[in-house]
């Protein structure tokens, strides 16, 4: 048998907006949580260090020499072809069922894998070991004639299969002479003919995703990249509540042995705003509509408009941070964290990031549910807090754990909250409220201009906080949220300052100053995309296109990116797939692509 592939982030996501999984280049299911994305990782070998035989589901051929992978076009259905030295081969099809049935979306806690012999007489070894309690132990099994029960920590799972159960459990190689079907789902008897049902699930899942993609308004150029990122962003939404997670994983280090390991399986208000903004550019309004429902519940539950930076996908606010002691970590680089203490922080940019996507629902007549005056009244509570906190210190978007300042980005987002509330008030014919919010927006702008701008011999620049004269990449967003025109001399001067201080060749740091863990060691991918957007707005399109193409060259074989990148080697680090980074791909492709009119 060949050794398992070296652990990397060259992974392929599958999912159905209830559960998800990451499959490595060898076809192994190495990460997957149940019953939802922030649940217990029954597949956790991605964070198992050298222990790769627990929390994994792998198929291998005897004498295996090659592996090829690709998605079924415009779907998250993955096909992995394993080839052996004797010419034999199998194809593995992986997906999580998702399609409409009986008037509602069928999206079970389930993984479906089909093995098809396509050449010769392949001999297959199956390694199937589920973990529980974050890798603390192997899930006990109860064997049946055509099924295996796995007793999990949160809920049990059952494998129904027409493969030889004994060979599967014992990891004994056997000849594959016909298609074999594996349905790992709820701990209940499988209803119907396994072969017919799983094939029908595959076909219906394919149709669902291809029809969803058909409704996207993609740019002319980079269509495959945009479609793959859009599908993956949708997989990051928990459909039951509309919450959108920042990534599907926890604790992939931001840099080698940095201990910058965080649990990203939660819904950050900030990250979700950027996600729906990007998908709106493609016309994927279903994601926006579900997310706005999540926001309405968050606002309703908040006391006096006080909003946390992040929540669980079910809207739970308490996300106590702990260490999963039994998981060594990605390549053994722990710790593995569960929960995220950032929920205790004050990050005042989130108020703007609630108002900005919510404002869309007052104007877009395509939506099934447009917002009304009652929604505006609730949203004004959020705006009141933005107004009250626009010049107060917070942890900022980079979530500093040991210091607070008045961050320019947070103040800018508070300005955006007031500015958009004025727009909504005008739309609703509320002249007095429009005047109030316009005046508040003007006052915040005056505060930013007086406290965040600094003159120097290089033409001056906005600084990252009111108290300290340092630069961060979030200043590039000043033009994106329409706080300042891209041709304004102050934005141009700030763009030059950001490039001078933070650009490392084709990459961008989020900041260069030391933080709680020392100096940053890797580039933050979304910041590079922010630079590309800023270059476009500054009419430096040739440079922007070249930089964008280089960034796409760093994507995995599946066309995706993680949070961070080593700016010397190009190696990916940080949680995967990172919504921020995928948003960057979509936004830049839309901005830089040639028009469809050029081919019509």
Image (cartoon, rainbow, N blue to C red):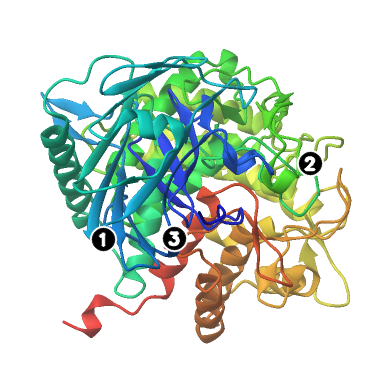
Residue in view at x 23 percent, y 48 percent: 209
Check contact, mark 2 vs mark 1: CB within 8 A.
no
Q: Locate residue 230 relative to residue 2 in the image: left or right.
A: left
Location of residue 386 (image quadrant): top right
Tell me if 504 is positioned left or right of 109 in this view.
right
Q: Residue at x 89, y 51 (%)?
A: 518
- Earlier sequence position, callout 2 versus callout 1: 1
Judge the density around disc 2: few (<14), some (14-19), many (≥20) Cα neighbours within 10 Å. many
Q: How far from the left and from the top, in percent, is residue 138?
A: 56, 23
**Helix, strand or loop under label 3:** loop
Q: Which residue is mark 2?
A: 406
- Numbered circle sitting on residue 217: 1
Does the rendering let one see residue 18?
no
The reply to whether dot 1 and dot 3 touch (C-beta < 8 Å) is no
Question: What residue is rendered at 66% in x and 76% in y?
Answer: 506
Tell me which label, 3 or 2, sits earlier in the chain: 3
Q: Read off the residue under disc 3.
A: 63
- At 21% from the left and 29% from the top, the residue drawn is 105
Q: How many marks?
A: 3
């Amino acid at each position: 048998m060949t050794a398992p592939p070296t652990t990397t982030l060259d992974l392929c996501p599958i999912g159905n907006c209830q559960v998800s999984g990451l499959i490595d280049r060898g076809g192994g299911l190495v990460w997957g949580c149940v019953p939802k994305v922030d649940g217990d990782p029954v597949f956790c070998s991605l964070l198992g260090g050298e222990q790769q035989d627990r929390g994994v589901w792998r198929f291998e051929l005897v004498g295996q020499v090659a592996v090829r992978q690709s998605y079924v076009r415009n779907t998250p259905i993955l096909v992995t072809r394993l080839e052996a030295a004797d010419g034999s081969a199998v194809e593995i099809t992986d997906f999580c069922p998702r399609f409409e049935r009986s008037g509602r979306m069928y999206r079970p806690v389930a993984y479906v894998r089909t093995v098809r012999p396509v050449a010769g007489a392949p001999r297959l070894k199956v390694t199937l070991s589920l973990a529980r309690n974050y890798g603390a132990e192997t899930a006990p099994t109860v064997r049946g004639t055509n099924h295996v029960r796995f007793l999990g920590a949160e809920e049990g799972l059952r494998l129904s299969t027409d493969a030889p159960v004994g060979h599967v459990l014992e990891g004994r190689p056997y000849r594959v002479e016909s298609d074999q079907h594996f349905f790992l789902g709820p701990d209940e008897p499988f209803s119907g003919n396994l072969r017919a049902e799983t094939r029908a699930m595959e076909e219906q899942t394919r149709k669902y995703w291809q029809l969803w993609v058909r409704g996207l308004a993609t740019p002319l150029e980079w269509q495959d990249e945009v479609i793959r990122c859009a599908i993956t962003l949708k997989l990051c939404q928990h459909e039951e509540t509309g919450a959108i997670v920042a990534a599907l994983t926890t604790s992939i280090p931001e840099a080698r042995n940095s201990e910058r390991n965080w649990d990203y399986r939660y819904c950050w208000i900030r990250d979700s705003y950027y996600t729906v903004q990007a998908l709106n550019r493609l016309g994927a309004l279903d994601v926006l509509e579900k997310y706005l429902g999540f926001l309405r519940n968050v606002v309703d539950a908040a006391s006096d408009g006080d909003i946390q930076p992040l929540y669980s996908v079910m809207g739970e606010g308490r996300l106590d941070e702990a260490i999963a002691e039994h998981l060594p970590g990605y390549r053994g680089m722990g710790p593995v964290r569960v929960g995220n203490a950032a929920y205790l922080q004050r990050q005042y940019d989130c108020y703007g990031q609630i108002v900005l996507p919510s404002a869309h629902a007052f104007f877009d007549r395509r939506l099934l549910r447009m917002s009304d005056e009652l929604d505006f009244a609730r949203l004004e509570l959020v705006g009141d807090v933005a107004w009250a906190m626009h010049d107060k210190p917070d942890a900022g978007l980079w979530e500093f754990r040991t210091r607070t300042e008045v961050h320019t980005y947070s103040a800018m987002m508070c300005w955006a909250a007031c500015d958009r509330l004025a727009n909504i008030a005008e739309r609703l014919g509320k002249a007095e409220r429009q005047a109030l919010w316009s005046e508040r927006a003007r006052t915040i702008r005056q505060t930013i201009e007086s406290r965040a701008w600094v003159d120097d011999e290089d033409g001056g620049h906005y600084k990252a906080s009111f108290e300290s004269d340092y630069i961060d990449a979030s200043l590039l967003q000043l033009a994106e949220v329409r706080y300042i025109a891209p041709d304004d001399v102050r934005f141009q001067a700030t763009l030059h300052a950001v490039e001078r201080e933070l650009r490392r060749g084709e990459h961008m740091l989020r900041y260069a100053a030391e933080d709680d863990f020392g100096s940053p060691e890797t580039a933050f991918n979304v910041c590079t995309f922010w630079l590309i957007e800023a270059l476009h707005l500054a009419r430096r399109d040739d440079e922007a296109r070249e930089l964008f193409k280089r960034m796409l060259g760093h994507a995995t074989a599946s066309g995706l990116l993680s949070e961070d990148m080593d700016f010397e080697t190009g190696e990916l680090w940080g949680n995967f797939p990172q919504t921020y980074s995928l948003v960057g791909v979509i936004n830049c492709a839309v901005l830089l692509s040639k028009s469809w009119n050029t081919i019509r």
